[in-house]
């Protein structure tokens, strides 16, 4: 079933450590009308990082079977879900942002044909420093994350690019500029 909405869904994608959640928080601080979907993840909340709801795999699967997610996917051995409550926000004409995975973009486009995609990038040295600083991986695990940093989107998928290699404030401003353009031309 294709969701009919007045608002807009915006997927923020990019490699681990690029600063997607930091940019989302910064954009929300500058544009309070934006809605940032709080992901449900099969990871303990104590793991830190982004604001998310940590649940067990059993709870995640139960919610999924009840239709509690507008989108869901598996990446890096974890299950991720975007709550179905985003439909109400979009019906009210709001822009809804979510930190997504490139693997869910085709499904997102199928369910939300006008989904906008923003790819956040950073140079390799910046990614390595940020991944090391967050302390979730080291050694070979960190190297594997860096190897996955270069990825391609489907050839027919349009996207907007935000470079977050420099100061966080610059990355936030670049993201807000793209979001402002999307708000002016909601289907662009």
Image (cartoon, rainbow, N blue to C red):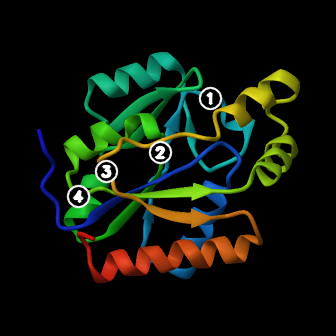
Residue under the image location 66 percent in, 42 percent down: 16
Residue under the image location 83 percent in, 51 percent down: 125
Work out whether residue 112 or residue 61 is closer to the camera in this orientation and state it. Answer: 112
User: In the rendered image, which residue does mark 1 sit on?
Assistant: 43
First in sequence, mark 4 or 2: give its number: 2
User: In the rendered image, which residue does mark 3 sit on?
Assistant: 85
Which structural element holds mark 3?
loop
Q: Marks 3 and 2, how far apart in space? A: 16 Å
Say which quarter of the image contains residue 21. bottom right
Tell me: 39 left or right of 16: left
- Residue 51 screen position, x and y as percent: 61, 50
For label 3, count other residues whose C-alpha is less than 10 Å away and answer few (under 14), some (14-19) or many (20+): few
Work out whether residue 107 or residue 134 is closer to the camera in this orientation and state it. Answer: 107
Viewer-nearest of discs 4 and 3: 4
- Residue 96 screen position, x and y as percent: 37, 62
Location of the C terminus (image quadrant): bottom left
Position of residue 186 relative to residue 64, above or below, is below
User: In the rendered image, which residue does mark 4 sit on?
Assistant: 114
């Amino acid at each position: 079933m294709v969701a009919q909405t007045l608002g807009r869904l915006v997927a923020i994608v990019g490699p681990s450590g690029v600063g997607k959640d930091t940019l989302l928080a910064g954009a929300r601080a500058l544009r309070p009308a934006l809605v940032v979907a709080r992901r449900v993840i099969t990871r303990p909340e104590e793991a830190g990082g982004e604001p998310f709801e940590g649940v067990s795999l059993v709870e995640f699967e139960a919610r999924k079977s009840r239709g509690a997610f507008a989108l869901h996917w598996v990446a890096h051995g974890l299950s991720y879900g975007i709550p179905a409550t985003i439909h109400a926000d979009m019906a009210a004409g709001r822009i809804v942002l979510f930190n997504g995975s490139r693997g869910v973009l085709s499904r997102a486009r199928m369910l939300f044909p006008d989904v906008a995609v923003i790819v956040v990038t950073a140079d390799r040295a910046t990614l390595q420093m940020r991944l090391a600083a967050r302390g979730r991986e080291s050694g070979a695990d960190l190297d594997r994350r860096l190897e996955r940093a270069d990825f391609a989107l489907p050839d027919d998928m349009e996207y907007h690019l935000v470079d977050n290699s420099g100061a966080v404030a610059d990355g936030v401003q670049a993201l807000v500029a793209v979001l402002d353009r999307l708000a002016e031309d909601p289907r662009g």
